[in-house]
Amino acid sequence: MVEAVAFGKLILFGEHAVVHGQPALAVPLKALQATVTAEPAPSGSGLQILLPDVATPLRLETHDALSVTAQMVLNHLGVPEPDMVLRLTSTIPLQSGFGSGAAVSTALARALSLALGHRISREDLNAWVYEVEKIHHGTPSGIDNTVIVYERPVFFIRNQTLESFDIAKPFELLVARLGYATPTHITVGDVRTLYEHDPAAIQPIFDQIGIISRQARQAIESGDLTPLGHLMNENHALLRKLTVSDNTLDRLCQVALDAGAEGAKLSGGGRGGNLIVLANKNRAAVQEALLQAGAVEVIHTWVDES
Ligand code: PMV
């Protein structure tokens, strides 16, 4: 039996503007992971993909995201359908802005190729997972697959070569999960419509978010994290203007700030999903306040390079 994993991801700065050419910062979220095991199966049984709590296995003919991923791996390796069971488990909540889709595809491609005795390059894997992301997200920027496949902090600009960034001084974040979500393709589509109706008003918002991402990178690389909280708050205000926040996200950001956090912003597609909070001084109080205010879970994570 072989086993492969892939971590979730967190977008720190720049979501949505990244779809329109601005830089974004994202890091692996190692607290959450998807795991796929591969076991040989009786001759003639073909490839079966077992999902948690789903009785019927997926097969190559199903044409869902995971079987499409498996088919891409088989095509690339030039091998016929193997007799094999791929079993998926994942601690990454679906549609929460943690890159669940990209992570399960990545873990599956890794497990399948390992079981077939091949190592696939990160470049190939990244390209396939991006293709699969397009099935769900319409016009994804590619940030999810990139950070998940490379397992590195990324300074991501669409259609440009991968750029990582250094984390001079590791820092801690709280990640509050709201327990509901809006599909990313909806919010991305709404932002596109907003832009198409009034590019002169929306382009400066994208540009300003791009400036914030660059300033945040500089702060993280220099180890002087003082500006980070303020940059998060500014980024959240701009995401509000793009209409991708909602009352709950705004309320919980304010709750975190009132309880002593230095910064808070939505992370990912928005209108639900999750928010990230920088709370160096009053972390326990902030965590408690977020739970009291309705967050279904508050995850504590380190942002570092390990
Ligand atoms: O739903 P998420 O966390 O994967 O958000 C994706 C981030 C967006 O910038 C909104 C879309 C994209 O493709 O980059």
Image: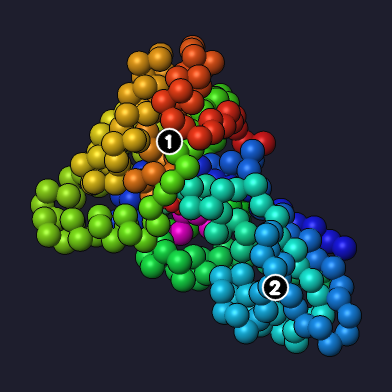
Q: Residue at x 30, y 41 (%)?
A: 245
68 in relation to 150, above or below = below
Q: Nearer the viewer, residue 270 or 199?
A: 270
Give whichever of discs 1 and 2 has the lower sequence position: 2
Q: How is the image coloured?
A: rainbow
Which numbered dot is residue 259?
Answer: none
Q: Is residue 142 above or below residue 153?
A: below
Where is mark 1, residue-wise? Answer: 275
What type is the residue that disc 2 sits on? Pro
Spatial CA span between label 1 and label 2: 34 Å
Q: Label 1 crowding class (10 Å Cα cut-off): few <14, some 14-19, many 20+?
A: many
User: Can you give x and y, in whole percent of width and height, for residue 243 in the image?
Assistant: 24, 46
Residue at horizontal 62 percent and vertical 84 percent from the top: 61
Q: Is residue 194 above or below residue 230?
A: below
Q: Which amino acid type is shown beneath numbered disc 1?
A: Leu
- Quadrant, the N terminus: bottom right
Rendered location of residue 100, percent (x, y):
56, 54
Q: Which residues are magenta?
A: 141-146
Disc 2 packing (10 Å; few <14; some 14–19; many ≥20): some
- Label 1 sits on a secondary structure element that is strand
Could you say which disc has been placed on residue 57 in the image?
A: 2
Q: Is residue 53 toward the left or the right of residue 19 in the image? A: right
Determine if residue 82 is in view.
yes
Q: Nearer the viewer, residue 203 or 109?
A: 109
Quarter of the image containing the C terminus? top right
